[in-house]
Amino acid sequence: MEWLIYLSVLLPIFGAPIIWFISHYTNKWFSWYLSLAVTGFSALVALLTALQVAGGAKFEHSFTWFNFGGIEVPFGIYIDGLSAVVYAMAALLGFLIVMYSRGYMEHDESPHRFFMKVTFFIGSMLGLTVSDNLIGMFIFWEFMGLASYLLISYWYYKNSAADAGLKAFLMTKFADGFFLAGIVLLWWYGGSLKVVEINHLGETAGIPLFIAAVSSLLMFGGAIGKSAQFPLFPWLLDAMEGPTPVSALIHAATMVNAGVFLVGRLFDFYAYSGILYVVLAIGAVSAFIAVLGAMVHREIKKIIAFSTMENLGLMFVGLGAGSLAAGIFHLVSHATFKALMFLSAGNVLHFTHEKDAFKIRGLRKFMPYTAILFLIALLSLAGIPPLSGFFSKEWIVHEAKLSGDPIVFAFVLTAAVFTIYYGFRLWFQLFTGEPNETAKHAREAYPVMLIPLVVLAVLTFIVGLFYKPIVHLIEQHAHIPHDWGLTILVFSLMAVAFGLAWLIYHKRAINTEELMKDPIVSTLNKVFYNSFFVDFILRWLSKNFVVEFLAWLAHWIDRNIYDYIVNGVAKIALWTWEKVRVIQTGNLIHYLTIFVSGAIVLYYLYLVIL
Amino acid sequence: MLLYFTILFLVVIATAIAAIELTNLIWVLVAFATLLTEIALFYFSLGFPLLGAFQLAVYAGGVAILVLFAILTIGEREEEKKESKLAAGVAVAVFITGVIASVWTGLHTKPYLDISLQEIGKVFVEKYALLVIPLGFTAVGIIYGAYYLLSKKLQGEE
Amino acid sequence: MKFTQEPMLWFLLVSVSLLAIGVYGLLSRKSILKMIISIEIIVNGANVGLTAFATQHGADGIILAFFAIALAALEVAVGLTLLIILARKYGITFPEKINNLRW
């Protein structure tokens, strides 16, 4: 079984260029079949593994990758419940998204390029989930960074896409520096790279608390970059320049989950290091910023991107509040409904060619199935029972309350409640009302695009129905709190928010144009729209501090100090040559004199040494 | 004995200095030949008559005559240049170094060995016979080279 | 007369004196003939040393002195040949005129 798991990771990674090669010289669309076969195989293996792990099995295999000096770098797989759930989920969603891409990429010139990158991306995520040590995780983590860069700037001829890819790459790389520093620190003081041993260090307090805190903070820095948390989230919004299946892949199956998964994987260590409070705070702030951004944005995909950021923030809140199962279970349930949501939005985008949600109206008649699937995703996102989102989100709100911090609880409650507002704002705008010209040109999506959506919708129900086994698979002794009072509070607030959305965007009873004339509202709108100007601050810092100061300083030091030293060495050599060459008089007598003197000196040296 | 040695020593030093310092090349040759003869006397006195005879034949005979021949060929008086103080300093340093080395190595004098001609011959045949072969080739090479240089030079002048 | 129990130091003193005089001549004279004579003085100094040591250690020193004398004679032959050839061109004090090794 272990070799099958290895194969499920290595086949997509090493098969990706082969897929490109074969398809390039045969039929370009042949790559779809190959990619489908590879990811399907991985998904099958992953599901089997997850079922076996659920049955009590544990997969563990490790070997020494290489060693030099005293440094031994291990490699291998370690699959427990937590890992198996994420592994199976990523593989399955990857497979469905590859299937969906046949319809979405139908007009593409080079689909084999697309499928090569997507397959590589999925393989990297699977590698991350099964890897048993931090070095392996870091390698696959970087593979994903590369793949996301390639896929976000897939339409490389568009300036905005190329810039977005670069931005995502630079921001995540900046964070990866912290991750690597954390790994090295942990390795130096903890003496181990294996996840199990690190968690054991945390449980037994086998490492100084200060070192544990610093290294886990550094690794959390990497997770912030990868999972698009405050303050390194602007790349996630720009990443919407990529094709929609890629967005679905990044948001649901792979990339952004990696940060959450990292914290979950080292959860015992984090719990020991006392950093969970930072995780909680960052998650709450991110969720708050994201939900406000989602409420005022206009582009379909940006709204969904903000929603992803919000849900990632909620996952970190769940982890930070001290419940591993809450965070990771929300990851799983979010992955299913967010993939469904993105792919339904992909249908809308593909058949209307319109990014702005407020230029489309009344699509329900033309795309009935998409409308229903979108609604299912939306209800799950908002947290309506019996869909999966209800269980995970309620739990996280409970955990936030239990954490005892009123500000965190307020932020999380805002995020949880207003989810339904921005969700239905989008849905009412897109699917209800009188159809306009853009909508009339649309048609229902192809079956190849609808089948994955239906599967995902069913999956959303299944995750909701079987939430207890999944939770207990993630964490064996997980405690699921029940607080009916809180649930009623959340639901009543949600009803108000829904009513607001219904009034504004369905009934059109409140005119938003009139509201915008109010200076306070428009200022707030501007602040929310720009996510509290974090992106501007980052840009300003990178321009004025990094480029204008650090780069200038490096340039100055290079030119005036290093170059000066190098040139100085040459000058000294020349000067020495000029001065010393005169001893080569060419006069035989001088040479003889020096020779004899040397002999005398050597004799005295001989006397001194012996 | 000390008297004999002192006279010998002084003569050797005096002739050596004379060979370096005199400006007339003929007197230089005379001093040089005297020096070589005195050194042969040392060999005789140390009990190696064969070596003394060899010294007289090869050095005082052959080399002195060669130098004489060269002087006659060139036929020039030496133009004496001013002396180098550095050279004198180096020579003094060599001398002091040598004295230190002598004291260092020659402190304990054992009774002299009585080395007969037979013994010299025996050691020569046992240890150094093979060395004569490369030495012979070297000598042939050197003599032929000298002849070649000289004959080519003479041809070039004609 | 024959030396029988004189200290080695005496003979080494002779040897060292010859060496020092030879070195002095080699370094201070500009004439090639004087330089050759200086070299011969050095070789003779070495031979005296070898012979003196032979009284302490056995016949090897004597044999080495023989070889040294033979080679020195050969060297004088070559040196004088070169002297004759080069003296026609540069005069007898030529070592300072040959400065191809100069910078």
Image (cartoon, grey):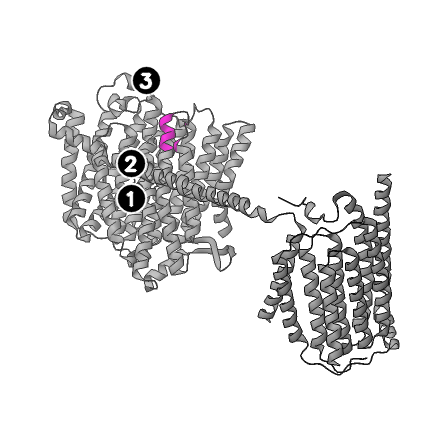
Disc 1: which residue: A464
Q: Chain of mark 2?
A: A
* Kind of residue indicated by mark 3: His
Under circle 3, the secondary element is: loop
Q: Residues within 10 Å of mark 2 (few under 14, many from 20)?
A: few
Q: Residue at x 23, y 35 (%)?
A: A533
Under circle 1, the secondary element is: helix
Q: Residue at x 86, y 59 (%)?
A: B136
The C terminus of chain A - image quarter? bottom right
Image position, residue A60 (x, y; %): 45, 56
* As drawn, A189 above or below A341: below
* Start-end of magenta stretch: A152-165
Q: Residue at x 80, y 76 (%)?
A: B45
Please tell me which residue lies in front, B82 or A309: B82
Residue C55 appears in the figure: yes
Disc 3: which residue: A441
Tell me, yes or no, whether dots 3 and 1 are on the same chain. Answer: yes
Which badge, 2 or 1, is on the more N-terminal residue? 1
Residue A475 appears in the figure: no
Of tags 2 and 1, which is closer to the observer?
A: 2
